Amino acid sequence: MDQLTAAAARALAEGDPLGALNWVALRDDAPALALRGIAMAQLGDLVRAKALLRRAVRAFGPKEAVARARCVVAEAEIALASRDLGWSAKVLDAARAALERHSDRVNAAHARLLEVRRLLLIGRLEEAERALAGLHPASLPPGSRVAYELVIAGIAMRRLRTKAARAALARAERAACHARIPALTAEVERAFLVLNTPAARLIADGEERLLRLEEVEALLGSNALVVDESRYAVRDARTAVSLARRPVLFALARALGEAWPHDVPRDVLVERAFGWKVADESYRARLRVEVGRLRRALRRQAHIRATQRGFALAPRRAREVVVLARPFEDEHAAVLAFLADGESWSSSALALALGRSQRTVQRALDALSAAGKAQSFGRGRALRWIIPPVPGLTTPLLLPAPLPVG
């Protein structure tokens, strides 16, 4: 590596993409193309960054396996930053293996972190934890340590282990200070913000209030029967019954949970479960069938008793029944929840993360766009969706890990 390339690499490692471009902006050799690509990615021009990295891969000779693998890792990170979750994990795994064979352990660890972050985004927590087990944080440089701790915190948040999440974010904050890269510090601050903002809405005794993540964790560990909208489940201290694939049963459970300890009229249950405002005899018969199914599903947790005007929920062990709803009621709340991370998403990536069809997600995005709650940019495959940024604030775009060229 010549002096100009080395200077550009140092600038990138210090979080200074403009300084890096000052050294290599006019050069078209393979190392310079790779560094220019990473600099453009940090500046937010992901399309140009991807093109430059692909040119760099072609420019590196077949004997320069390490350099080519580093470019593949950089391109994978760009895909992750742009929420292109469909990129090939096998290609990244091959690049990681090549880096390990040539003893480039830092960039190999970075490649593994990228795969773990992808698994975390699409909700495969068990796979993410298994992949993370092969990494040793003590051997990572400060930038990689930040990414590692952010992944640990992300898994802990999804597992509702807020104490572990705060500890991981504290370690990430110390590593970010040591790395002295403002973008990394900003990402840690955004992660702390997630812990301190409302994560759910509690509905009980006819009243509502917002809960932070710690409060949600405490509620799920209490002696209450919780109808959990975020996971489409009914849970108490001992068991959890998933109704994710039975939306009618969950709608009934939520209606009964909101009314507890009172009963719910049959006409109201028909409307909540089937969307039919006038309950004729056929819908009443269908309601009896679905209530019977819900009664069987919840038999260990609660009894559903018939009353003169409808049905009521009676917990077997729990002292109370509460509903844990999303913090803000919206028909497309699940899509909004993913857009709320401040990054741009493609409709295909959202569909993959939500486990829904791309057409369903696209209809939700169109509705949110019409309501002014989401906006798009780009065209074709480069089309991305974001929540409109607050005036005066930029939407952050970050590749939060050490750069894979050095």
Image (tube, rainbow, N blue to C red):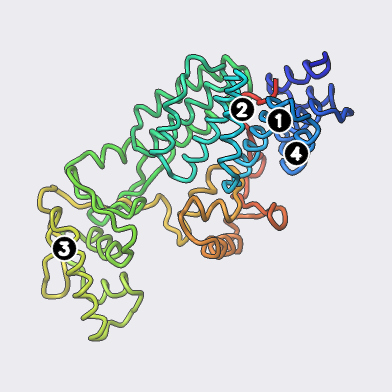
Label 3 packing within 10 angstroms: few (<14), some (14-19), many (20+): few
Task: State the residue in front, 85 or 333.
Answer: 85
**Residue assigned mark 2:** 98
Marks 1/4: CA–CA distance: 9 Å
Marks 2/3: CA–CA distance: 54 Å
Label 1 packing within 10 angstroms: few (<14), some (14-19), many (20+): many
Is 321 placed above or below 76 here?
Answer: below
Task: State the residue in front, 266 or 110.
Answer: 110
Q: Is residue 305 left or right of residue 398?
A: left
Is 257 placed above or below 338 here?
Answer: below
**Residue assigned mark 1:** 68
Sequence-first tag of 3 and 1: 1
Q: Which of the two discs, 4 and 3, sits closer to the camera?
A: 4
Q: Residue at x 35, y 42 (%)?
A: 211
Please provide percent x and percent y for residue 314: 12, 58
Label 4 packing within 10 angstroms: few (<14), some (14-19), many (20+): some
Give the quadrant of residue 266.
bottom left
Sequence-first tag of 1 and 2: 1
Sequence-first tag of 4 and 3: 4
Q: Callout 1, which amino acid?
A: Arg
